[in-house]
Amino acid sequence: DAGVIQSPRHEVTEMGQEVTLRCKPISGHDYLFWYRQTMMRGLELLIYFNNNVPIDDSGMPEDRFSAKMPNASFSTLKIQPSEPRDSAVYFCASSLGAGRQPQHFGDGTRLSIL
Amino acid sequence: GESVGLHLPTLSVQEGDNSIINCAYSNSASDYFIWYKQESGKGPQFIIDIRSNMDKRQGQRVTVLLNKTVKHLSLQIAATQPGDSAVYFCAELTGGGNKLTFGTGTQLKVEL
C-alpha cells in the first residue's frame, strides 16, 4: 500500500526564494498534519487539516508560512520568502479519524536555505 | 549566542538482549500514547499505541507499559536486532484530542 508521499525529498535554495513542499496523504485518510523537525526544537506540529479544512494553525511560525489543501489527495506548505532559519526537515502525516488514531508519516523534505 | 541542539539520550544494547526505552509525559489529562521509530533519513514509523485505560499492550516483539501514577511510559523490545537501531519517540495526545506532542527521543544503538 502506498504511504504518505512527499516531494521533493531534498530542496536547496537561496534566502528570499519561495519554497513549496508537497504532500499526498494515504487514500481515505481525512486528517493531514504538517510537522517540522530540527535539532533545536525536535518535532513540532505546524498545522493540521480535517476534510481539507485547516483546523489548527497555531504552530505556524509566522506569516511567511502558509498551507493549503485543495482536495483530499494533495496539500502544500509554502514559505515565502524563505530564510536560513527555516532550514529543517518537514514532514507530512495523515490519519483516518481524529484523536486516538495513529498518524502515518511520509519520509519528509529536507530543506536547506542558504 | 551559540545554538545548542537537543541532546538525545542513547541506549546501547547487545544484539539479542532486551531493550527498555523510557519516556516521561507531561500532561496528566493525556489519554492516548504512541511510540514511533525513526531511522536515519526517514519519517517516524508507527510502532504501537496504548490508551490510558490500559497499563500494558503487546505487539510483535514490543510491549508498551503505561504508569499513569507517575506519568511514565516505556517501550520494551525483545531480542533486539541490528534493524532496531533508530531514534524512538513517545508521543501523547493533547490539545483537545487531535494534536500529538512528541518527546525528544532516545537513540537506540544495537551492538553486534
Image (tube, rainbow, N blue to C red):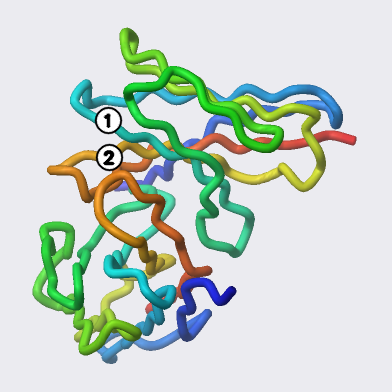
Tell me where residue B14 appears, x and y as whole percent.
83, 27
Q: What residue is at 32 percent from the left and 87 percent from the top?
A: A20
| Quadrant in the rendering for residue B33 | top left
Name above or below for residue A86 compared with residue B99.
below
Of A76 and A49, which appears nearest the observer?
A: A49
Give, as a three-letter code, the residue at label 1: Asp
Residue at the top extreme, as displayed: B69
Q: Which label's residue is closer to the chain start, 1 or 2?
A: 1
x%, y% of residue B18?
74, 22
Label 2, secondary structure: give it: strand
Q: Residue at x 25, y 54 (%)?
A: A98
Residue appearing at x 38%, y 78% in the figure: A113
Quarter that holds the C terminus of chain B: top right
- Asked if disc 1 and disc 2 are in contact, CB closer than 8 Å, the reply is yes
In-image side of A79 versus A84 (left or right): left
| Residue to which mark 1 is pinned | B31
Q: Is residue B2 left or right of residue A52?
A: right
Left or right: B95 as drawn, with respect to B35: left
Residue B81 on image: x %, y % = 81, 39
- Labelled disc at residue B93: 2
Q: Is residue A114 visible?
A: no
Q: Residue furthest right?
A: B112
